[in-house]
Amino acid sequence: MAGLAVLPSTSALPLPFPGCSRRAGSLRRIAPKVGRSGPLTIVAQLELKPPPYSLNALEPYMSQETLEFHWGKHHRGYVDGLNRQILGTELAGLSLEEIVIKSYNEGDLLPTFNNAAQIWNHDFFWQSMKPDGGGKPFGVLMELIERDFGSFEGMMAQFKNAALTQFGSGWAWLVYKANRLDVGNAVNPCPTEKDYKLIIEKTPNAVNPLIWDYNPILVVDVWEHAYYLDYQNRRPDFVSTFMDKLISWEAASARLEAAMAQAAEAQAAERAREEEERRKEEEEDEETRDDGGDMKMYVDSDDDGLEDE
Ligand SMILES: [Fe+2]
């Protein structure tokens, strides 16, 4: 493996702000290495990002032992696995989010999808929690929850139901939906106002809402490795504790703010594109009218000639 620069699995790099993790990805490019004998080798490695708190900070609701296994072994395994899979492939130069979306491959999953999506999901999960979390959301997030679910309690009931009814391993999400899609892997460029709303989704295994172009706001991991050491088979107890004691509504609010700004930006870009199209059509119409005017003058002239005969 001469010429390859390999990063350690852990890093002291600062975490991206919770709401920005989707765009930030976790790819670090390493400067080209110049070997004595020749060609430059550029290697990119994904890093295992630590949770934004110490591993015992969520006790007694989530133990240090759970974090040591869940983050230290399971999450690390996904990072190490993906780095092996993408080495030397076209995926090696992409951001984590790009790898997730590209490897989803319209539902025909490539081998890298599970590792890539699990890394993204776990980064997002760690940032969805904080010590002394829980309570209630505030501001715009609370307003949208009440608008779209009727009440905070209504949203929490739907979220818990999704977490408990996800058969086998998977995830339950609160997401901001800014398009018209229910399924698929495309982007609808023309959502209407009623398409912008919060919804609850559940996904199996590693699947996440990025593949539908939704903006995740909050997630709970319902793989057994997330709760078995602390709660054994009692998933309902784990989910209730997550909701009441661990959720970081600050992180959720920041993500919603970023999602709404992104949607507004997309809307403005779409309006600008439509305006540009309209302007071009008007220019073309004007040119056609100008051409038509010349022809009319020519026909009139011709008619005049006939009359003269
Ligand atoms: Fe997990």
Image: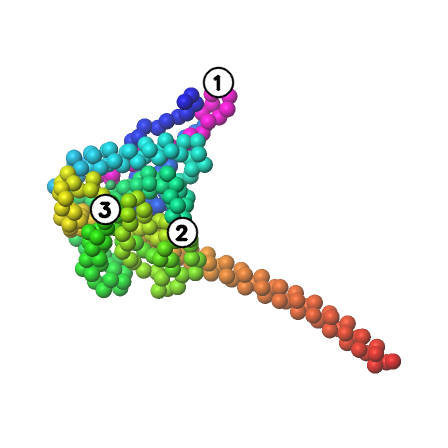
Residue occupied by mark 2: 185
Q: 10 Å neighbourhood of mark 3: few (<14), some, or many (≥20)?
A: few
The single residue placed furthest to the right in the displayed view is 309
Q: Quadrant of residue 113?
A: top left
Residue occupied by mark 1: 36
Look at label 3 and name its amino acid.
Gly
Judge depth for marks 3 and 1 and give the one in front. 3
Mark closer to the chain start, 3 or 2? 3
- Tell me the SS state at disc 3: loop
Q: Is residue 208 magenta?
A: no
Q: CA distance from mark 3 to mark 2?
A: 24 Å
Q: Is residue 49 magenta?
A: yes
Q: CA distance from mark 3 to mark 1?
A: 52 Å
Residue 124 visible? The answer is no
| Helix, strand or loop for the magenta stretch, by majority | loop
Q: What x and y, as percent, mark residue 72? A: 24, 33
Q: CA distance from mark 2 to mark 1?
A: 46 Å
Q: What x and y, as percent, mark residue 296? A: 73, 73
Q: Which residue appears at 19% of the width and 51% of the height?
A: 164
| Numbered disc total | 3
Q: Which residue appears at 32% of the width and 55% of the height?
A: 176
Judge depth for marks 3 and 2 and give the one in front. 3
Look at label 1 and name its amino acid.
Arg
Q: What x and y, as percent, mark residue 175? A: 30, 54
Q: Which residue appears at 47% of the width and 21% of the height?
A: 35
Residue occupied by mark 3: 168
